[in-house]
Image: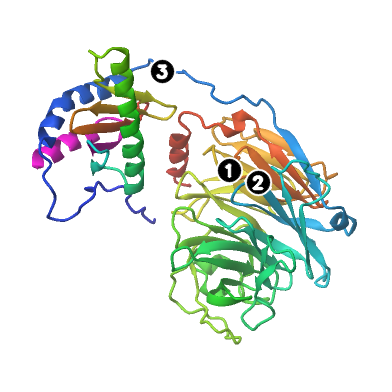
Amino acid sequence: MAEVEETLKRIQTHKGVIGTIVVNAEGIPIRTTLDNSTTVQYAGLLHQLTMKARSTVRDIDPQNDLTFLRIRSKKHEIMVAPDKEYMLIVIQNPSE
Amino acid sequence: MLTDPQDHLAHQFPLEGELRPTFSGLSDFLHRVEDMIVKELAKNAKSHAFDGFDVNWEDQNETVSCKHRLQHLVAQEKGLHVTSISWSCTGSVIACAFGRVDDGDWSAEKSCVCTWNLDRRGLNPKRPNTVIDVARPVMSLSFHPTSPSLIAGGLYSGEVVVWDTNRTQDPVLAQTGMSTDAHREPVYQVAWVPGQRRGEMLVLSAGSGGRVLLWTVDGGSLVLSAGYALVRQQVPHNSSLSKGRGSSNVGVTSLALSPWDSDTFLVGSEGGLVLKCSFSAQELAAAPPDGESVALRAPAQFSFSPRGGPVHSLHYSPFHRNLFVSVGTDGLARLHSLLQPDPLLSLRVSDSYLFGVRWSPTRPLVFAAATGQGLVQIFDLGRKSLRPAATMDQLTSGQPAYCMEFNPCQTDLLAVGNADGSVNIWHLSTELTEQGHRETAQLEQLANEVAE
């Protein structure tokens, strides 16, 4: 699984990245660079939000689908790349 | 120079060790999304799209205003001062202790602890919701961190008491009494600290006898669980202090628990010492045994540069694990890093004594200081000028403001206890409570400066 670790490391060391989390289809985190409690919080909440975002897109147009989700807050930007089996969450502080 | 332990080592979740399940398709998934993510990360790092973009979710509060002025007439008639205040864990109730801060032997003076529920309708600022009569002046107070009805208090006589405001008959839940384990001198600080067992909380008490004691609630008594004695000979790097003269005990006037490291605490003394201490210190104290049931240990590990007078208040920064601020009778607020003895910054707050200092719970660069002239000065370290960002006059006709606490839930409320027996509840402006963009980074910069 060295490839997985290397890919995650490349993402994590990018400028301003605070944390990287991989979540499975059930919303359970399977890889993370953050501490346990923070990871569990992000994974649970963002999994729910991503599902809601996806159903919003598909309700408006059943031929469309969610490809990427970004949340901009005062302090960071949270990016979610969704997929059938997994979800990648990256938290970045853009102004660093 | 001390070094800081590393945080946030990357780890695998949920299993560690050799056996890790191989997730089929994980490698392919990451391969698919990597380019897209890296492209977006790079664009973000360069983008100015959101520069200066702010959203107003909350109502903007332009001014600082005094919401309530709480008084207990009986205590005021006796000329008692508010020595300590504490908010309940829910943020609804403010409790204040009455006693006296000036010198003199008034150990027989009766006093009380009063509480007001600010969220209850029909709040009468002149009528507390609860009045607990206490036989001796109360010098320190602390609400339990999870049980909203329990309050610990330290008395002038050295006793430590836990009251339960739910009890109607006799509010005393447990007390130390005048046992051989108890303090013999006024207890200036009480706090609740987690015990060994899950959910267990111990009462910590510290006083001018130089003892820091930990008590468990056992039936109607507070039983001594562990104890520390601060003795001058055992204070590290003590060369600058004069030897002899007076007791060798280091009288504790203030104490701060670290929100970052449950083993560390800071102590401020009558003689101007600021010491970093550890609960797990093993060395026995050089104090002569006085019938205590537990062997007292020497907790001091590091000495910060001493002040010219008693240290009345210490507070750890809630935003940086190595920063704390201290104030005392020299009228200065000193910002310290835990890693070096000399302060990073010395701010002249007042020509009078300073009695309290508290960091803002929401703005990393902001702290408030209570002065002997009855003012609370708020400083913003992000500003170029070192003049206060706001001044709150406690309207005590020049009498001191002794203690301050931010509400743990409604973080824009600040309670101030005064020598004229009043407690003022202030509502701070949005400017003083809303965190700015790069505040945490600025604080980090400050913390990394090395003193000359």
Q: Are marks 2 and 1 in contact (CB under 8 Å)?
A: yes
The numbered mark at residue B217 is: none
- Residue B129 located left or right of residue B409: right
Q: Amino acid at mark 2?
A: Ser
Check disc 1 and report the residue beneath it. B409
* Residue beneath the point at 48% across and 53% down: B259
The numbered mark at residue B50 is: 3
From the image, which quarter does the N terminus of chain B lie in?
bottom left
Q: Say which of B292 and B90 sits in front.
A: B90
Q: Are marks 1 and 3 in contact (CB under 8 Å)?
A: no
Check disc 2 and report the residue beneath it. B92
Mark 1, Cα crowd under 10 Å, few <14 / some 14-19 / many 20+, is some
- Residue B386 located left or right of residue B450: right
Q: Tell me which chain the residue with mark 3 is part of.
A: B
Q: Say which of B336 and B357 sits in front.
A: B357
One can see residue B182 in this view: yes
